[in-house]
Image (cartoon, grey):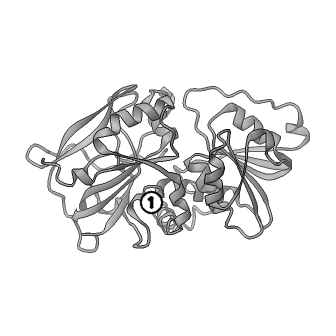
């Protein structure tokens, strides 16, 4: 997740404020819960009590393992990050909570914010987006991921009747597949090594295939698997003059590609897409806030519940992150519940 660095100051005196708790990466591979004290909100701030946060498995596990390249440490900062890579760092950006203090039009409302895993927090009122009433709070943690998918489809600009493949059935890939599948006349296939993702594809209303069986001659392939093998297979699936839209982020890993063969004769294209800025196709007419509000409206679709595949308590987060980073906890989106932390002074 690459986002503009927040201008919100973390330097105010917290000594006598409200108690809260936050998840920190102490060093690569070691997470911990730390106490926090929050001052009273200022006139343009909100105090939010967190209900749920989501773990963006690809990016957050990469951060947890300490794999952010030194050259990308500024670019990879999350909006409300504290500390620096490789650690100690407080990182995360899928947070849904209730505004307990703030402007009247926000008080009592459920909101989404690009805030790390923390039981309660202060943020500028402009940094939170109201969650539509028809979107359950636990589903709303997907807003940042659906926003990435929206930006990707603005970049890709698929046409009616296109044949589209999404390689990688993680959070981003599944969100892209669901949105692309709603275009009239479009054929969407979701490709993943894990055969259990066939059930997820079915819930999203798209076809599923493993890489060896994936359909060829595709107009567009959206690659999200963060693997060199997935990117190579994506190129193999293209029709002449087709495009691979690359959404994966590889951290400090090099990627080898066979750019001989049909790459030139087929006039194939690889295009990067990244959510840090609004797609050029809409940048003049949509702000990041507009894009996020659209993502939250799209989450009224109950099909997205198929992506929430696990839930743990906030106290369990250090162990959950360790298991996700090691690959021993299978998940698409793992949600952290803060219900038991609604009174953090306990």
40 vs 263: above or below = below
241 vs 194: above or below = below
Q: Secondary structure at mark 1?
A: helix
**Left or right: where 304 falls relative to 246:** left
Q: Position of residue 79 (x, y in %)?
A: 39, 47
Q: Which of 184/38 is in front?
A: 184
Outermost residue on the right side: it is 265
Please tell me in which quadrant of the rendered image residue 247 appears.
Answer: top right
Q: Which residue is mark 1?
A: 139
30 vs 192: above or below = above
Report whether residue 341 is seen.
Answer: yes
**Left or right: where 39 falls relative to 122:** left
Report whether residue 152 is seen.
Answer: no
Q: Position of residue 262 (x, y in %)?
A: 89, 37
Q: Position of residue 216 (x, y in %)?
A: 84, 47
Q: Residues within 10 Å of mark 1 (few under 14, many from 20)?
A: many
User: Going 91% across and 40% down the picture, which residue do you hit?
Assistant: 265
How many marks the image carries: the answer is 1
User: Going 26% across and 42% down the picture, which residue do you hit?
Assistant: 22
**Left or right: where 68 falls relative to 345:** right
User: Going 68% across and 38% down the picture, which residue do you hit?
Assistant: 193
**Left or right: where 160 falls relative to 293:** right
339 vs 223: above or below = below
Q: Position of residue 250 (x, y in %)?
A: 58, 33
Q: Which of 157/219 is in front?
A: 219
């Amino acid at each position: 997740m690459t986002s503009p660095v927040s201008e919100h100051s973390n330097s105010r005196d917290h000594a006598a404020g409200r108690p809260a708790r936050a998840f920190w990466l102490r060093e690569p591979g070691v997470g911990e819960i730390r106490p926090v004290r929050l001052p009273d909100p200022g006139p343009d701030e909100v105090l939010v009590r967190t209900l749920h946060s989501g773990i963006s498995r690809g990016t957050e596990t990469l951060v947890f393992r300490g794999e952010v390249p030194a050259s990308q440490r500024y670019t990879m900062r999350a909006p409300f990050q504290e500390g620096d890579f490789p650690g100690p760092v407080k990182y995360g950006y899928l947070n849904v909570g209730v505004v307990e203090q703030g402007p009247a039009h926000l008080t009592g409302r459920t909101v989404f914010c690009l805030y790390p895993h923390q039981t309660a927090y202060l943020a500028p009122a402009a940094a939170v987006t109201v969650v539509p009433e028809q979107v359950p709070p636990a589903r709303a943690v997907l807003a940042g991921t659906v926003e990435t998918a929206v930006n990707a489809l603005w970049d890709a600009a698929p046409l009616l009747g296109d044949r589209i493949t999404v390689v990688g059935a993680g959070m981003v890939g599944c969100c892209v597949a669901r949105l692309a599948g709603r275009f009239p006349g479009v054929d969407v296939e979701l490709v993943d090594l894990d055969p259990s993702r066939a059930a997820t594809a079915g819930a999203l209303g798209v076809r599923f295939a493993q890489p060896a069986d994936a359909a060829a001659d595709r107009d567009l392939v959206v690659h999200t698997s963060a693997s060199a093998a997935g990117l190579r297979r994506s190129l193999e699936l293209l029709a002449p003059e087709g495009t691979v839209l690359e959404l994966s982020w590889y951290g400090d890993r090099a990627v080898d590609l066979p750019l001989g063969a049909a790459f030139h004769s087929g006039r194939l294209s690889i295009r990067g897409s990244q959510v840090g800025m609004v797609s050029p196709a809409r940048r003049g007419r949509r702000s990041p806030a507009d894009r996020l509000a659209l993502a939250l409206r799209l989450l009224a679709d109950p099909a997205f519940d198929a992506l929430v595949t696990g839930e743990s308590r906030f106290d369990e987060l250090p162990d959950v992150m360790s298991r996700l980073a090691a690959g021993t906890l299978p998940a698409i989106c793992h949600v952290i519940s803060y219900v038991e932390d609604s009174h953090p002074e306990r």
